[in-house]
Amino acid sequence: MRPLMICLHASELNIEIMERSLHEMPFEVRHVVDTHLLHIIREQQSLAEQKNYIFTKMMELIEQEPVLILVTCTNYIVLLEQMELVTSIPILKIDELLFEQLKSSHLPLKILFTNKQTIEGTMTRLKKYISPERESEVVFIPEVFDWYLAGEKLAHDQKVLNTLLELDTYENTVVVAQLSMANIAEIYSKLSGDVVLSPVTAIKTYMNDLIFK
């Protein structure tokens, strides 16, 4: 029996992205989709209520006894960073794997977001990984995250692609901060020859290092 790995997502569309990324890995991958946290945030429930909800959800996942939990939802990640969750099971935060990849370069960063609610928390955590002198620019693409959650993937992807095409990528490291943009980042990289880093490139690097070290 293969060891169990749980992936926690905010959208069912992320399952397909992760399945392609993990299909060669020696794990039984169980996907859990939780859209309720977004409703709690949009209803402006208190931070304590949000944390309590996340704690309960994470304990449910831990009780399934996986060898690791991968969290792909940036809303979850930002809130988990503010909590103490005691467990021996590794909880991988997908953007932290991405941050690790950014440490090896000193080029200015252009970081794309579609979920405005996660920008501040993500950028604050990123500063723990990179030099404070390193230039970084946030590129926010409005509306399209709601399109993605509503299943309007083609419209979402086209807008993200157009934004990438309009960016000045010369002597910059370009990054998409959210898993929802990973597929289109890969397509753009193939079309342009410019590498765009994403959570998918990060998880592939991490998993290969884990298996083959």
Image (cartoon, rainbow, N blue to C red):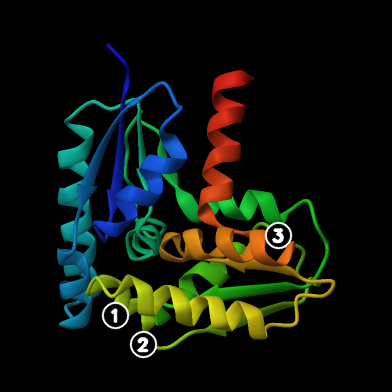
Give residue 150's position: percent from left, percent from top: 22, 75
Q: Quadrant of the C terminus?
A: top right
Crowding at label 1, few (<14), some or many (≥20) Cα neighbours within 10 Å?
few
* Residue, disc 1: 146
Determine whether, in the image, residue 50 is placed left or right of residue 195. Answer: left
Which type of secondary structure does the marked residue at label 2 adopt?
Answer: loop
Q: Amino acid at mark 3?
A: Val
Determine whether, in the image, residue 46 is placed left or right of residue 194. Answer: left
Q: Amino acid at mark 2?
A: Glu
Give the residue displayed 17% in from the left and 49% down from the top. Answer: 57
Crowding at label 2, few (<14), some or many (≥20) Cα neighbours within 10 Å?
few
The CA distance from mark 3 to mark 1 is: 26 Å
* Residue, disc 2: 143
Give residue 100's position: percent from left, percent from top: 64, 49
Which type of secondary structure does the marked residue at label 3 adopt?
Answer: loop
Which is nearer the N-term, disc 3 or disc 1?
1
Which is nearer the N-term, disc 2 or disc 3?
2
